[in-house]
Image: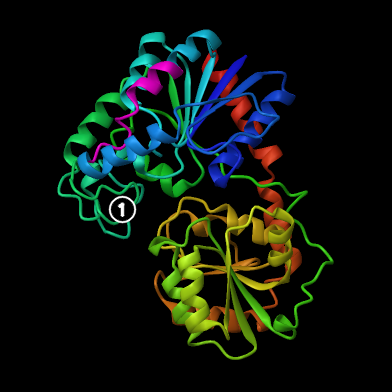
């Protein structure tokens, strides 16, 4: 069976790592997998196809900035990709993130319908059923249920459209492209996102929840400890994100820094250079800001050393950072938003009211007296999210949808 995955990135970021994990599981099942991607590079051991190039990416970005048509540019490179698909003749297409300024989704879905290719589409956010945004909870907007228009966040939220609100037309274009696929099943990593799909124009498709999984052989308790004197006798409050934007809750960490006692120290991983400079100037005594790292061993060390993993996300699907922390034996404290609480039980973490920093502080202080929450229980909960077990469900989906 020939399987082609399509995603913005390949091997990096949460979705890129998921795509590669599925690739290798498919290989082990004696399938023939490929990954088509739009940005960055590909791992050497992955049979891949890069859609477009840096120039086309820039043109697509500008097209969205000025015209608000994310997902409806890159025509020529999409046509080249579809010619490549003609040669591969995939038995299944597994779609991931299609936004990211690299592919024309209208041409792609016309091709799918014309060739009647079975499709598994894993939704990692809400972009496939909105006219503009990837998340809308922060804006408290429900226009996506009927018809997007007058988007309140088209300039501020990814994928940004700086000069034109094209949410009404984009909604119509997406709806026309995405509905009417003869053989497609949608998967979501969270029950929260699955419920939203059922309220959208994608409700005609069956929806299956398959949680994100992680590598439990990599993320695990270790005996290594940080030697820097700066952290001696400190309780580390850890935050990790690919991009620390408003949605990920950076401001809440800055607020928390003003509230915590001297025994605590905050470590933020994944900040930009600009954010790092700001934090060093104002909060160097209580916050250590580290730019994005690709060193997984270093990340595991931080997870292990942390007293608690804090995830003040305002909108999220099913964050793998929660799972990574739990797998290393570290309890998680998160806002009650999106699918973030779905991996948390009373034995491994605390879910607090969205936006309430005082509740985060109270939860942190309560950990020492909470005998239910142990490092052993955190690891036990994480064992439920072994990628090698969970992702085999996709192999069964491939078989079923081809039948």
Q: Residue 8 location, x and y as percent? A: 48, 36
Q: Tell me the element at label 1.
A: loop
User: As drawn, which residue projects farthest toward the bottom?
Assistant: 262
**Residue 366 in the image: above or below residue 328:** below
Camera-side residue: 53 or 314?
A: 53
Q: Residue 103 location, x and y as percent? A: 39, 29
Count all numbered tags in the image, as a single digit: 1
The image quadrant that residue 298 belongs to is bottom right
Q: Is residue 208 part of the magenta span, yes or no?
A: no
Q: Residue at x 61, y 39 (%)?
A: 11
Asked if residue 177 lies left or right of residue 86, the reply is left
Q: Residue at x 18, y 45 (%)?
A: 164
Picture quarter with the N terminus:
top right
Camera-side residue: 188 or 97?
A: 97
Q: Which scheme is used to colour this image of the protein?
A: rainbow
Q: Residue 69 location, x and y as percent? A: 25, 36
Asked if residue 286 lies left or right of residue 221, the reply is left
Camera-side residue: 292 or 157?
A: 292
Q: Residue 136 location, x and y as percent? A: 31, 53
**Residue 360 in the image: above or below residue 129:** below
Circle 1 Cα neighbour tier, 10 Å, few/some/many (<14 / 14–19 / ≥20): many
Picture quarter with the C terminus:
top right
Which residue is disc 1 drawn over? 136
User: As drawn, which residue projects farthest toward the left?
Assistant: 150
Q: Is residue 78 part of the magenta span, yes or no?
A: yes
The span picked out in magenta is 68-81
The reply to whether residue 16 is in sight is: yes
**Residue 8 in the image: above or below residue 84:** below
The reply to whether residue 98 is in sight is: no
Q: Residue at x 47, y 17 (%)?
A: 118
């Amino acid at each position: 069976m020939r399987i082609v995955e399509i995603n913005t990135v390949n091997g990096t970021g949460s979705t890129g790592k998921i795509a590669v994990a599925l690739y290798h599981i498919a290989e082990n099942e004696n399938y023939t997998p490929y990954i088509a991607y739009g940005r960055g590079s590909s791992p050497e051991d992955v049979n891949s196809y890069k859609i477009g190039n840096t120039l086309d990416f820039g043109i697509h970005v500008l097209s969205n900035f000025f015209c608000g048509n994310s997902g409806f540019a890159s025509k020529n490179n999409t046509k080249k990709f579809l010619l490549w698909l003609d040669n591969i003749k995939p038995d299944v297409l597994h779609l991931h993130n299609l936004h990211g300024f690299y592919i024309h989704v209208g041409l792609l879905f016309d091709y799918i319908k014309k060739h009647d290719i079975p499709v598994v589409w894993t939704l990692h956010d809400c972009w496939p059923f909105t006219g503009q945004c990837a998340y809308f909870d922060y804006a408290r907007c429900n226009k996506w249920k009927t018809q997007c228009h007058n988007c309140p966040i088209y300039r501020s939220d990814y994928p940004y459209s700086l000069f034109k609100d094209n949410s009404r037309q984009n909604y119509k274009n997406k709806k026309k492209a995405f509905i009417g696929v003869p053989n497609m099943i949608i998967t979501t990593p969270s029950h929260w996102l699955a419920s939203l799909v059922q309220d959208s124009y994608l409700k005609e498709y069956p929806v299956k929840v398959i949680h994100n999984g992680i590598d439990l052989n990599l993320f695990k308790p270790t005996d290594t400890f940080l030697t820097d004197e700066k952290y001696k006798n400190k309780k580390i409050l850890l935050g990790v994100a690919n991009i620390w934007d408003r949605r990920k809750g950076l401001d809440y960490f800055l607020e928390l820094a003003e509230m915590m006692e001297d025994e605590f120290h905050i470590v933020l991983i994944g900040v930009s250079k600009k954010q790092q400079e700001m934090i060093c100037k104002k909060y160097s005594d209580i916050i250590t800001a580290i730019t994005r790292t690709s060193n997984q061993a270093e990340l595991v060390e931080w997870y292990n050393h942390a007293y608690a993993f804090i995830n003040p996300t305002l909108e999220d699907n099913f964050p793998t950072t929660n799972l990574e922390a739990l797998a290393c034996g570290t309890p998680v404290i998160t806002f009650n938003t999106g699918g973030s609480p779905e991996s948390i039980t009373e034995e491994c973490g605390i879910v607090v009211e969205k936006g309430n920093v005082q509740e985060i502080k109270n939860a942190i202080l309560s950990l020492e007296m909470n005998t239910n929450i142990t490092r052993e229980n955190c690891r036990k909960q994480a064992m439920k999210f072994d990628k090698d077990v969970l992702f085999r469900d996709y192999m069964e989906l491939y078989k079923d949808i081809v039948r």
